[in-house]
């Protein structure tokens, strides 16, 4: 499917449209937020002040403006998530693509690597790594990518394994082009939709995992991100003191971003694999055997 | 049959390699750390200790300056004998003992939660696929997606505060009541059950959606297979087709995922245990990280990895049993 | 729907509800643990022994009361310095029995001290660096001989938890010994229950204080986090705790003003902003004083500590040493007062002039950039440091906050690889230990070498002379004069920037027990975190129910 038709099909897909709007709104917030919000760390009011006309979302346990922190926190959080998404898919495409495309020994070796990373327990590894590396966004991206790439590599491997046997790839190889070039120029573009949906999936995962790690105090607690907002809220016993407003806005933001991204993922799957969406009479057989949607996990 | 056995054996070989990789990672990581545990531990007392205590701590932990390769061989040898060293935070208790105390609780809680979520999710997924475009299929995935989009600990904390603390519907913490004597008594089992409901529930809520979607999408594919069309043509009941033809085949890919998910949940239980003060390994890990207890950190990471490998192996066996092609 | 859970429980045959302790049992939360590990070795330093090991099961010879600043005789009835402060003589108490009924004597003290000599890992305060010999000439006398006079050694020896020779004599390795069935002289010695989530410690049947303790047993539920401990406090499931509670007036006291109380006296260690005095321009006392005057301590304690602490005074000493401070006019440092104008003037005077961008320049023209390091997990310090950084920026210092993992922070602090760092002062029973850590040339290590104290590497030989003189005298007036002289050096040199004395957290509920220390009855510190002081409290508590039951009868 051509890129432009995917784009218009995405917009026609109800779920995808809601997702795109949601994600777009938060991206806008990440860009515009810091411009309109004041210094999120400034002490502007009494601690744990309920939402009012002055502080629309109240103040934190330290008398900082919750709205400003939520707005400013969007940027670094989404940036880390997007970078993680890109890096994860990048590593996945490289390793998975090479494995599927080259086959043989290379495939055996790389598949083993993928499987090893796949069975390594992610969260503990993240906790341990995040504790061992210097805190900050770079560490966060590295830790999340390192623990998240294997799944995508596996899916991409399966796809490139299938594409390798296609005529245009065989032809390109026969004409003497270097395999790596064929992989990058011919094969990867042909799984653009898979890469896109992997990217969305990895980004969604990165938002949640990042917030989780920062909540545990394993991020840079001096920075303002959604994760550290929740860390400080918990630190100030937001719930015990009844200060729900320090806890809810950021939590909702995280959920809505994640939800938006998931919907975009749904949309991508449905658009590129129409069998998954078109409603039919109950129980009637449908179409062809499944291709390779990311949900089909065959070891 | 031979093919199946051969395949299982190959998987076993792979798990061995994975275990070795985890072991090595485990060895390398703490050695990249700045400082030594004695200094770190000295610091934790925030000035309560005299400067002389730092030397006492070094003497206590018997820190060494051996060459790396020798340390590595020694480490592998010790691990092979089941010796994971002595925990620093719980000195002089062996880490294996500390971990052993928590592992059972984690596996029980996370195990129950993941099984319930898996059964519920795959069931709902199969039903959604069967009634394509029906109410379940239309609103199910978005709703479960929204639920699993909330940060897990956020939902968990909110539920502890609202459901347990304010409304008093559930116990606030722990795996069983403090006045209950552990043992195979009905009282104890009941206490464990009532303490597990809320943490397990939050895990189920957060993870059912994924299973549902996966099962739905695979089932949609399976429904397109010729044999399903043939069964329909023969006039078999919907229920029979759904259970025997569709679900059974569609569940296979999900099963592979199940082994992996079990691992994710065992480790994901970390957050659950933090919020619910559940005495499992997840909380231990966080505590080990916070108190710079490297032997315990290493031991826990290894134990969790081995548990995940074990779960995957079981999933492999289940796949062989369920998949007619391997027989 | 606890009903629902209870119904589910009932179906399975259970009705366990709230985790109430039986009457007469005091529920204490001091350690934050997810599950309990059985270890009652009071001598091992790592903090892995359960809390009462050194302040409930085993007892020291004397207890230094941080609130009153007075030594309370305990297993010893008194002490005396002899032979020009080279010999320390303790008289042990008669009639004290171990919990197994065997008599306690001076031989047990000697045994314990020799255990430290034979196992340096147990000698956490370096007693045997000064002590040459210890003996018991009779059953109630302990004689400790020092190589050189060392009066501060009293604290290390008097506070040592004493273990029974007749039990520990058979222990192969006292360093790894977990003392699972402890035999002690303390008020609570019998481990009644030990499970991963809760354990209980019952009374010593042979306790030497007549009619004490009135508490039947101590109960320790595993509370892995502040949040959980706070929930339990609010629900009145805990009688005595030492954890931090935010907005305590509202969420704890407000819940039950009649029974819920707290007391946070500032008797912890002093929290300092340490300037690395080996790095220019922090080697200049004027600059250090200027930075100190730039800090708005009232805001620091408000933001970092919920106003539970007070700004530091000019002596660098916390309230533990209130009686030692030189209160004469002008003896106090004026540079702990917030004064941005004077700070700026001092910086100008030191040659650090403002650049066009509002950042001061060093002599070579480079901007004055200083980073403040803190351990990432310590939220109160991170917040305090945030305020400090903002304050420093207001006087033209390009200050940056760096939150590091604890180990990494500790490594950089102890090796002297930092500009500015938050840190604590050493704790002890006299200001000797504080000023030693702040200014002693002997304690200063070269940059790159791990230093246990004096991380900012400030060496003042004049202070070493004062410290040396202090170590040789047991005369209170002379000691006080020497401390005042040290304070004068501190005020003159500003080796470190005091921020606030750390409060010691303590909460209690009087719904089941009374007799807790408080601001109105400060017979001891309330916090259970300050060992061995809790012995003073544990032996004073009285169950409420007991009295009421007697009346009802």
Image: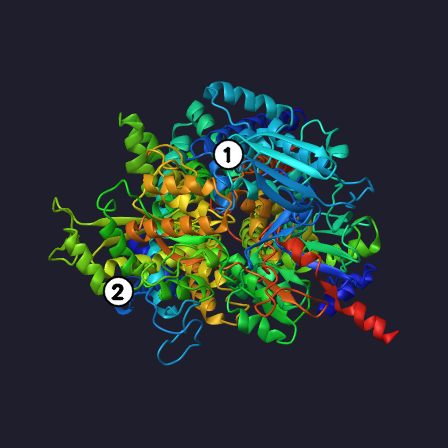
In three-dimensional space, the C-alpha distance between marks 2 and 1, rounded to whole angstroms, equals: 62 Å
Residue that label 1 marks: A115
Horizontal side, residue C195 vs residue B7: left or right: right
Give neighbour class at mark 2: few <14, some 14-19, many 20+ (Cα, 10 Å): some
| Quadrant hosting residue C388 | bottom left
Q: Position of residue C465 (x, y in %)?
A: 37, 39
Discs 2/1, front: 2
Element at label 1: helix
Give neighbour class at mark 1: few <14, some 14-19, many 20+ (Cα, 10 Å): many
Residue that label 2 marks: C339
Residue at x 12% of width, y 47% of height: C365
Residue at x 48% of width, y 64% of height: A236
**Quarter of the rendering occupied by the N terminus of chain B:** top right
Residue C277, above or below B188: above
Q: Position of residue C5 (x, y in %)?
A: 73, 64
Asked if residue B254 shows in the view, the reply is no
Q: How is the image coloured?
A: rainbow
Q: Position of residue B296 (x, y in %)?
A: 57, 37
Element at label 2: loop
From the viewer's side, name the closer residue of C413 and A103: C413
| Quadrant hosting residue C332 | bottom left
Residue C65, above or below A65: above
From the viewer's side, name the closer residue of B118 and C207: C207
């Amino acid at each position: 499917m051509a890129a432009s038709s995917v784009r218009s099909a995405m917009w026609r897909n109800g779920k995808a449209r809601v997702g795109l709007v949601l994600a777009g709104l938060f991206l806008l917030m990440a860009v515009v937020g810091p411009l309109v919000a004041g210094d999120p760390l400034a002490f502007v009011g009494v601690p744990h002040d309920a939402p009012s006309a002055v502080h629309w979302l109240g103040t934190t346990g330290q008398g900082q403006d919750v709205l400003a922190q939520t707005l400013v926190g969007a940027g670094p959080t989404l940036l880390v998530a997007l970078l993680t998404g890109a890096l994860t898919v990048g590593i996945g495409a490289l390793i998975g693509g090479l494995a599927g495309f080259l086959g043989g020994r290379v495939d055996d070796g790389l598949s083993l690597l993928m499987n090893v990373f796949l069975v390594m327990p992610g969260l503990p590894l993240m906790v341990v790594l995040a504790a061992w590396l210097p805190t900050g966004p770079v560490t966060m991206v590295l830790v999340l990518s390192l623990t998240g790439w294997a799944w995508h590599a596996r899916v991409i491997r399966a796809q490139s394994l299938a594409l390798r046997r296609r005529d245009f790839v065989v032809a390109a190889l026969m004409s003497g082009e270097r395999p790596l070039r064929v992989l990058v120029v011919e094969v990867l573009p042909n799984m653009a939709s898979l890469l896109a949906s992997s990217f969305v999936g990895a980004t969604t995962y990165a938002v949640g995992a990042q917030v989780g790690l920062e909540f545990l105090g394993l991020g840079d607690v001096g920075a303002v991100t959604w994760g550290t907002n929740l860390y400080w809220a918990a630190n100030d016993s937001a719930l015990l003191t009844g200060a729900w407003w320090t806890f809810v806005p950021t939590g909702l933001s995280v959920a809505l971003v994640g939800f938006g991204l998931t919907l975009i993922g749904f949309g991508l799957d449905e658009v590129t694999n129409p069998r998954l969406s078109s409603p039919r009479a109950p129980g009637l057989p449908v179409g062809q055997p499944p291709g390779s949607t990311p949900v089909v996990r065959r070891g | 049959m031979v093919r199946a056995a051969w395949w299982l054996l190959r998987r076993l070989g792979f798990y061995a390699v994975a275990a070795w990789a985890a072991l090595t990672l485990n060895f390398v990581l703490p050695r990249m750390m700045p400082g030594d545990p004695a200094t770190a531990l000295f610091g934790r007392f925030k000035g309560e200790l005299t400067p002389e205590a730092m030397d006492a701590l070094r003497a206590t932990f018997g820190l060494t300056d051996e060459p790396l390769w020798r340390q590595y061989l020694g480490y592998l040898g010790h691990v092979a004998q089941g010796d994971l060293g002595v925990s620093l935070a719980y000195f002089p208790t062996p880490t294996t003992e500390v971990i052993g105390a928590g592992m059972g609780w984690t596996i029980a809680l996370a195990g129950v939660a993941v099984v319930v979520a898996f059964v519920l999710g795959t069931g709902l997924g199969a039903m959604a696929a069967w009634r394509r475009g029906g109410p379940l299929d239309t609103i199910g995935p978005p709703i479960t997606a929204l639920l699993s989009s909330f940060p897990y600990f956020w939902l968990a904390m909110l539920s502890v505060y609202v459901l347990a603390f304010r409304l008093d519907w559930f116990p606030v913490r722990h795996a069983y009541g403090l006045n209950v004597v552990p043992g195979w008594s009905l009282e104890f089992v009941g206490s464990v059950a009532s303490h597990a409901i809320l943490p397990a529930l939050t895990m189920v809520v957060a993870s059912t959606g994924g299973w549902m979607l996966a099962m739905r999408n695979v089932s949609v594919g399976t429904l397109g297979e010729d044999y399903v069309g043939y069964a329909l043509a023969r006039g078999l009941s919907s229920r029979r087709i759904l259970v025997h033809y569709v679900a059974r085949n569609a569940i296979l890919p999900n099963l592979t995922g199940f082994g992996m998910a079990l691992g994710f949940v065992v480790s994901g239980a970390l957050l659950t245990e933090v919020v619910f003060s559940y005495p499992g390994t997840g909380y231990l890990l966080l505590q080990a990280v916070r108190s710079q207890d490297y032997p315990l950190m290493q031991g826990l990471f290894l134990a969790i990895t081995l548990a995940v490998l074990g779960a995957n192996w079981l999933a492999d066996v289940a796949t062989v049993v369920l998949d007619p092609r391997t027989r | 729907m606890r009903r629902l859970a209870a119904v589910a429980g009932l179906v399975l045959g259970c009705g366990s509800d709230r985790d109430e302790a039986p009457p007469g049992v005091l529920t204490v939360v001091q350690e934050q643990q997810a599950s309990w590990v059985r270890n009652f070795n009071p001598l091992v330093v790592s903090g892995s022994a359960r809390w009462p090991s050194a302040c409930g099961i085993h007892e020291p010879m004397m207890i230094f009361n941080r609130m009153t600043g007075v030594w309370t005789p305990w297993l010893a009835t008194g002490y005396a310095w002899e032979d020009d402060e080279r010999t320390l003589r303790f008289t042990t108490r008669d009639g004290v029995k171990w919990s197994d009924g065997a008599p306690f004597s001076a031989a047990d003290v000697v045994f314990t001290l020799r255990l430290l000599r034979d196992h340096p890992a147990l000698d956490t305060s370096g007693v045997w660096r000064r002590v040459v010999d210890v003996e018991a000439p009779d059953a109630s006398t302990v004689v400790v001989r020092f190589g050189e006079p060392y009066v501060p050694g009293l604290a290390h020896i008097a506070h040592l938890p004493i273990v029974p020779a007749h039990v520990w004599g058979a222990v192969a390795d006292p360093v790894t010994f977990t003392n699972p069935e402890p035999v002690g002289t303390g008020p609570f010695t019998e481990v009644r229950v030990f499970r991963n989530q809760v354990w209980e410690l019952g009374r010593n049947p042979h306790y030497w204080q007549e009619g004490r303790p009135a508490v039947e047993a101590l109960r320790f539920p595993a509370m892995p986090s502040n949040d959980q401990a706070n929930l339990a406090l609010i629900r009145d499931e805990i009688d005595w705790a030492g954890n931090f509670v935010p907005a305590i007036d509202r969420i704890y006291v407000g819940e039950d003003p009649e029974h819920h109380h707290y007391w946070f006296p500032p008797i912890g260690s002093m929290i300092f902003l340490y300037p690395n005095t080996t790095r220019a321009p922090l080697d200049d006392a004027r600059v250090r004083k200027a930075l100190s005057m730039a800090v708005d301590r009232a805001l620091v304690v408000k933001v970092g500590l919920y106003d539970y602490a007070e700004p530091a005074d000019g002596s660098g000493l916390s309230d533990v040493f209130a009686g030692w401070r030189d209160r004469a006019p002008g003896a106090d440092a004026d540079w702990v007062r917030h004064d941005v104008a004077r700070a700026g003037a001092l910086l100008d005077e030191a040659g650090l002039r403002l650049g066009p961008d509002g950042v001061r320049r060093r002599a070579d023209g480079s901007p004055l950039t200083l980073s403040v390091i803190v351990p990432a997990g310590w939220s109160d310090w991170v917040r305090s440091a945030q305020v400090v950084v903002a304050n420093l920026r207001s006087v033209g210092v390009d200050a940056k906050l760096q939150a590091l993992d604890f180990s990494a922070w500790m490594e950089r602090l102890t090796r002297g690889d930092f500009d500015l760092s938050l840190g604590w002062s050493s704790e002890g029973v006299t200001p000797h230990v504080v000023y030693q850590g702040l200014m002693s040339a002997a304690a200063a290590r070269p940059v790159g070498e791990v230093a246990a104290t004096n991380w900012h590497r400030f060496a003042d030989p004049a202070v070493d002379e004062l410290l040396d003189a202090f170590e040789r005298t047991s005369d209170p007036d002379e000691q006080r004069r020497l401390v005042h002289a040290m304070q004068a050096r501190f005020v003159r040199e500003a080796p470190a920037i005091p921020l606030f004395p750390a409060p010691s957290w303590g909460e209690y509920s009087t719904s089941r027990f009374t007799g807790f220390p408080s601001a109105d009855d400060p017979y001891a510190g309330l916090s259970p975190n300050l060992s061995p002081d809790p012995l003073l409290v544990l032996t004073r508590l009285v169950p409420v129910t007991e009295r009421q039951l007697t009346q009802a009868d």
